[in-house]
Image (tube, rainbow, N blue to C red):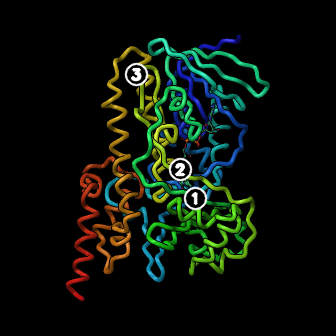
Amino acid sequence: MNKEVVDVLVIGAGPSGCVSSAWLHNNGLKVKVVEKTKFPRFVIGESLIPRVMDHFEEAGLLDALKSQKFEIKPGARFIRGEEVCVFDFSNKFGEGWDWTWQVPRADFDNVMAQEIIRKGVDLEFESEVTDIRFDGSNSITTVKDKNGDTKEIHAKFVIDSSGYGRVLPRLLDLEKPSSLEPHSSIFTHVKDTTRVPGQEGTLISFDILETEVWLWVIPFSNGNTSVGIVGPTDYIDQLSQSGNTEEALRCAINKSDYYRDRYGKLEFLFEPRRLTNYSCAVKQLYGDGYALTGNAAEFLDPVFSSGMAFATESGILAAKLAKRQIEGETIDWEREYSDYILSGVRVFSTYVKEWYTGNLQTLFFHQPENPDIKRKICAVLAGYVWNKDNPFVKKHDHVIRNLAYLIENEKEIKL
Ligand code: FAD
């Protein structure tokens, strides 16, 4: 059997694997990426948040991405009937990027993959990890290529960025149920022939149809727009009882007073796809000789577009720690990786839960707006969930619930 020897093996060439491998390569390590599919390939996750820009910059990928003129995302709009709440990332608490992009991921991910190849990263497409054996932190990974030929890759460290492939969670029995309620989604792209000029045409929007059910609208710079419905799995099951996802998504769009006219009759560019019970978690984020990043570790919910930011945050941090370990340092993975990553996950997890209880929606749509509170929530939505100076990060586990309670009670007192 063929054998290759590298410092770090990265499984998967999504955003997590790309930033991770780019950083390792830029910092002098011999890195190999194996990717199961051939790019460009479709993947969902099209709305980014500003925190990812820090990671693309650090990985040296920002200029290649900027040159593509993807649609700029300066904020996000939430709609509930007649009520509208717009977050502007330039008006947030603390430091950080005030814009990012909304992107067709097939193109976006391909730009990153081609850029890392151009820089000299050894990225092998259509090659799939099928097995792994560890001897301490050294590992031997079996990889099968498109012709069915197998080889072994010897690595000092493995970063699993395989997304929903969840290679190491499956092989090492690390899967754990998510603490979130089961939710599902159906989505497609449309040719946005009815797009109006100006910001209205390109603004990313979330239209709340019921407290737990919302529609996303993500316009791209290529003239297409992504449209998707998210809700409890029971709701999505009912919507798609006939098994016809096209019918189900059209029915959902027609429930939207805001978007019915604009998208109700447009042709879908592909048969809408369904992802059922998409949230996932793991028992541990690392082990001897490996770390899990991005969706191979944990995915919460699309509502605050945190998936990519978590994927790149964990990808780049795992790369930095792996380098130090390979150079002989003893790394406290629990503290430096798991505790750090999970503290951000916990903030987003609270926001997701409080979205679906309706408490966060109470804050978003409360009038008159409180500019100070809005700036602090905006920083969380921008992905700066490690900034403990922000009370909406530090006290995430009760601040939203308490404020929503006060608002609701104030209403009752006025009644
Ligand atoms: P991926 O981008 O999935 O990349 C993993 C790669 O690994 C793939 O290319 C795959 O082919 C490869 N792979 C898999 N198995 C193997 C194997 N055995 N061997 C080799 N390679 C393998 N996130 C956002 O930020 N914004 C959003 O708007 C958003 N919307 C979402 C909507 C829905 C309905 C869902 C379910 C998720 C959404 N997400 C969103 C989350 C987003 O899709 C992910 O968080 C993000 O793609 C994770 O990136 P990744 O690099 O970890 O994995």
Mark 1 closeness class: few <14, some 14–19, many ≥20 residues within 10 Å: many
List the residue tagged with mark 1.
Answer: 185
Residue 321 falls in image quadrant: top left
Q: Type of residue at label 2?
A: Tyr
* Upstream in sequence: badge 2 or badge 3: 2
Q: Secondary structure at mark 2?
A: loop
Can residue 53 be seen? no
Mark 2 closeness class: few <14, some 14–19, many ≥20 residues within 10 Å: some
Q: Nearer the viewer, residue 118 or 14?
A: 14
Q: Does residue 134 sit above or below 384 in this rendering?
A: above
Q: Does residue 102 sit above or below 30 in this rendering?
A: below
Decide if ligand 1 comes within 8 Å of the CB at mark 1: yes
Mark 3 closeness class: few <14, some 14–19, many ≥20 residues within 10 Å: few
Q: Nearer the viewer, residue 402 or 318?
A: 402
Residue at the spot x=71%, y=40% of the render? 39
Labelled pair 2, 1 in contact (Cβ < 8 Å): yes
Q: Type of residue at label 1?
A: Ser
* Upstream in sequence: badge 2 or badge 1: 1
Decide if ligand 1 comes within 8 Å of the CB at mark 2: yes
Residue at the spot x=33%, y=29% of the render? 334
List the residue tagged with mark 3.
Answer: 324
Residue at the spot x=51%, y=68% of the render? 214
